[in-house]
Amino acid sequence: MAEQKIHTADLRTGMFVSRLDRDWLDTPFILQGFSIEDREDIEIVQEFCEYVWVESEFDARKGPSKSANLGSASRPSAPPPLPQYQASIKQEHKKIYSSFRRARTITSQLLDDFRLGAAINNAAAKQTVNECVKSVIRHPDALLWMTKIRESRQYTADHCLNVCILAIAFGRQLGLDEAQLQHLGLCGLLHDVGKMRVPHDIVEKPAALTPKEWNMMKAHTVHGRNLLMSTENIPNTVVDVAYSHHERIDGEGYPRKISGNDISRFAKIISLVDAYDAMTAERCYSKPKTSTEALKIIYNARGKQFDEALAIRFIETIGLYPAGSIVELYSGEVGIVIESNPQRRHLPKIILVRDADKNPLEKELVKDLQYIESGELPRRLLIKQVWCDGSFGISLRVYQQRGLVLKYS
Ligand SMILES: [Fe+2]
């Protein structure tokens, strides 16, 4: 269907917006193509864009035509209602701090056991996943915040636990039940155990791998399958995910080059989560990408590397400003997101930690940006840009250690 470019001042309820004058992923409208349902939608579009493209059968002077109305076959279907939180973010931060540290220690021990060929503590692995599932069900933002704080010396262990947590949060959004979440979490925790059988200097090499080294690296999928198959009480799905999490929808992955629905759903999920966490981590050979940059890459690789529908749902799950994001406001001030807002994704709750000149604030302030809509907060507090951990001298670890999240959440 042809499109018509209009000024956002001419937007009306019922119009179907098919294009923006800026990147979709820089706006609260992550899904390409949406209908304008009310005045609030118009105001949000106007906040971000000057011009948009609407389906051309819509006549701006007459109002919505039938064909411009809702229900286009190409439009993404509405996601199911968001699950309700069972705890406040503050309660959840209090609960999970020590269990998260324990989970990190257990994950490191598990990987060491795999490296040494020792007996694996299955019960500890399942208990760790279980605690993560319970926490994500109560309120996902507390554990998602913790995934942003990494130990640079133990990348693989941090990555495995992060993939476990992110997969559980994603599975919860997909409507999986608690037993399925436990299963998926275990897939995430153990997906990369095969790396324990790849020489450490290859896994951590601060430069491009030679073809021979790359083949050794790719073999971690086969090592993972073999290690898990010879471990007691490991479900087949977990073995399959370790083997298949680098396969691609277009058949260009490894090790088997399988494609489409020959790849299991859990392997497709872990493939997305794995890529996102790897891109947002600082590695010896690359700088971390912001969450937005990583989501853009995933969006552009949908239908090729990643399952298209799952990629869109994953982008929705992470959202624009996940907990732990460092955000610069239009005022120039800088804050840290402590709680996302599933209904108004561009208006999370933040702690302000830098003034407009990027100097530390003597007293940090909490701002719930949803009050911008009612006019109780000024519009200069809208978020302009996301930055990586460490930007402006802000370290999430330091704020965690100072108990700032607990104090203000
Ligand atoms: Fe992997």
Image (spheres, grey):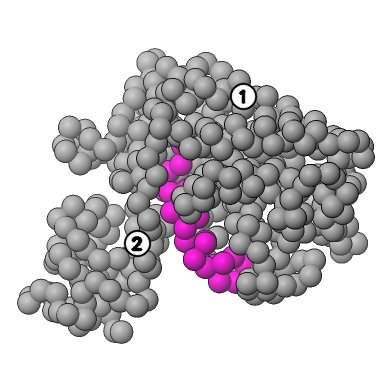
Q: From this view, report whether residue 254 is shown above or below residue 61.
A: above
Quarter placement of the N terminus: bottom left
80 in the magenta segment: no
| Residue 134 drawn at (x, y percent) | 53, 34
At horizontal 52% and vertical 61% (from top left) the residue drawn is 311
Residue 98 figure quarter: top right
Tell me which numbered mark, 1 or 2, is placed earlier along the sequence.
2
- The C terminus sits in image quarter: top left
Residue 277 visible here: no
Find disc 2 in the rendering and name its residue: 78
Is 385 rendered above or below residue 393?
A: below
- For ligand 1, tell me if the residue under mark 1 lies within 8 Å: no
The x and y percentages for residue 96 are 55, 25
- The kind of residue tagged 1 is Ser
Going by the numbered disc 2, the residue's amino acid type is Ala
Q: Do the CB atoms of the residues marked 1 and 2 lie less than 8 Å apart?
A: no
Tell me which segment is drawn in magenta. Answer: 301-323
Where does the image place residue 278, in percent across and percent down from the top left? Answer: 65, 48
Q: Distance of mark 1 from mark 2, alpha carbons?
A: 35 Å
| 218 lies above or below 292 | below
Q: Secondary structure at mark 1?
A: helix
**Figure quadrant of residue 236:** bottom right
Q: Position of residue 64 (x, y in %)?
A: 14, 74
- Residue bearing the label numbered 1: 99
* Residue at left offset 74%, top offset 33%: 123
**Residue at figure coordinates x 52%, y 47% from the top left:** 177
Residue located at (49% from left, 24% from top): 93
